[in-house]
Image (spheres, grey):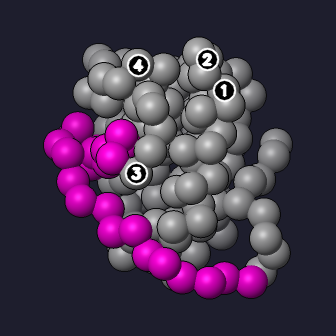
Amino acid sequence: MTIKVKGIAKSTLDFILEVSKSSAPKEFAGLLRAEEGIIKDVIFLPGTESSRISATLRLFMMPNISIAGSVHSHPTSNTNPSRADLALFARVGGHNIIAGAPYDMRSWRCYDSNGISITLNVLDIEFDDDDSNAVLL
Ligand SMILES: [Zn+2]
């Protein structure tokens, strides 16, 4: 399930920070979809707890969908993964974003499936499939 990821589109990251901010004080959670190695889409999941992602994950175990990892927000400035987060990361994929308050370019971190903080490149790319970064279930 591990796929090669070059980075995340800046517009997708902006979108994530925006949604995190507007969801606060609730958490928002979703899966990250990559296209040609670049994370471009957020797949929203029903519910707001990151533990829900695990339950819904099997829906996405399809060959034509590349899930690069997960994203969720922490309504505090603490971007360290919780125990539940670590269990989730181990299942979802190699790139798991936690966005903490105040949801700016410096208040998010990315973790691999072992919960180790990793660098995720932010790519200032244009993409034109459609302008939406969100896939609703
Ligand atoms: Zn968390």
Residue beneath the point at 17% across and 43% down:
116
Disc 3 crowd, CA 10 A, few/some/many (<14, 14-19, 20+): few
The answer to which of marks 4 and 3 sits earlier in the sequence is 4
Vertically, is 128 above or below 112? Answer: below
The answer to which of marks 2 and 4 sits earlier in the sequence is 2
Vertically, is 103 above or below 10? Answer: above
Three-letter amino acid code at disc 2?
Lys
Q: Position of residue 8 (x, y in %)?
A: 46, 66
Closer to the camera: disc 2 or disc 3? 3
Q: Is 58 part of what is drawn in magenta?
A: no
Residue 74 appears in which quarter of the rendering? top left
How many numbered circles are shown? 4
Q: Is 114 part of what is drawn in magenta?
A: yes
Q: Which residue is mark 4?
A: 76
- Which residue is at the far left? 116
Q: Which residue is mark 2?
A: 26
Residue beneath the point at 46% across and 58% down:
68
Q: Position of residue 128 (x, y in %)?
A: 74, 83
Mark 1 Cβ inside 8 Å of ligand 1:
no
Vertically, is 92 above or below 21? Answer: below
Kindly tell me whether residue 134 is visible in this rendering. Answer: yes
Task: Tell whether label 2 touches label 1 (CB within 8 Å).
Answer: yes
Residue beneath the point at 21% across and 54% down:
118
Tell me which segment is drawn in magenta. 106-128
Three-letter amino acid code at disc 3?
Met
Vertically, is 29 above or below 67? Answer: above
Q: In the structure shown, which secondary structural element does the residue marked by tag 4 occupy? A: loop
Q: Which residue is mark 1?
A: 23
